Amino acid sequence: MSQVDAGNYAGSWREASTYFQGAVAEKAWIESLNGVRKPLGKLLSRKLRNAQHTKSLPGAPDGDYVVMQFDTRFANKKAAVETVTFMQEGNATWKAAGYYIK
């Protein structure tokens, strides 16, 4: 998330899971974040709301996942909920597999 917070959207795509990279093209990811995340402005605070472990998610292969929700404040949006999904890849590394702001 630090790459996204810093505006390094290409870097965040490169650090994401192989599954995410196969589902979302780098250019589309950058364009999406420029349209959705960038207008929110600087991150002011982020607090973990909840985290849920699961072995399956709709439309994704079975595996080890953690879905985390954060209460987040940005300079231009005082109350947002970020949902970040992480998946464990073969080498036991946890990588981002999904990101959504509401």
Image (cartoon, rainbow, N blue to C red):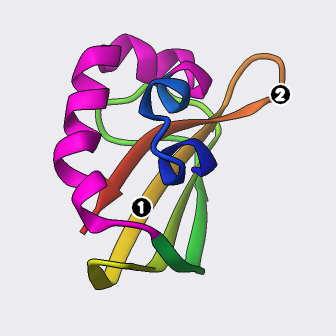
The residue depicted at 58 percent of the width and 65 percent of the height is 52
Which residue is at 54% across, 15% downward? Answer: 18
Q: Position of residue 67 (x, y in %)?
A: 52, 57
| Label whose residue precedes the other's in the sequence (2 or 1) | 1
The secondary structure that most of the magenta stretch takes on is helix
Height in image: 94 above or below 29? below
Q: Which mark is residue 92?
A: 2
Q: Nearer the viewer, residue 4 or 54?
A: 4
- Residue matched to label 1: 83
Q: Under tag 1, what secondary structure?
A: strand
The correct choice, above or below, for 45 with respect to 85 in the image is below
Q: Which residue is located at x 27 percent, y 78 percent?
A: 76
Instruction: Check disc 1: other Cα within 10 Å, few if <14, some if 14-19, many if 20+.
Output: many
Residue at the farthest left position? 35
Q: Is residue 37 visible?
A: no
* Magenta highlight on residue 33: yes
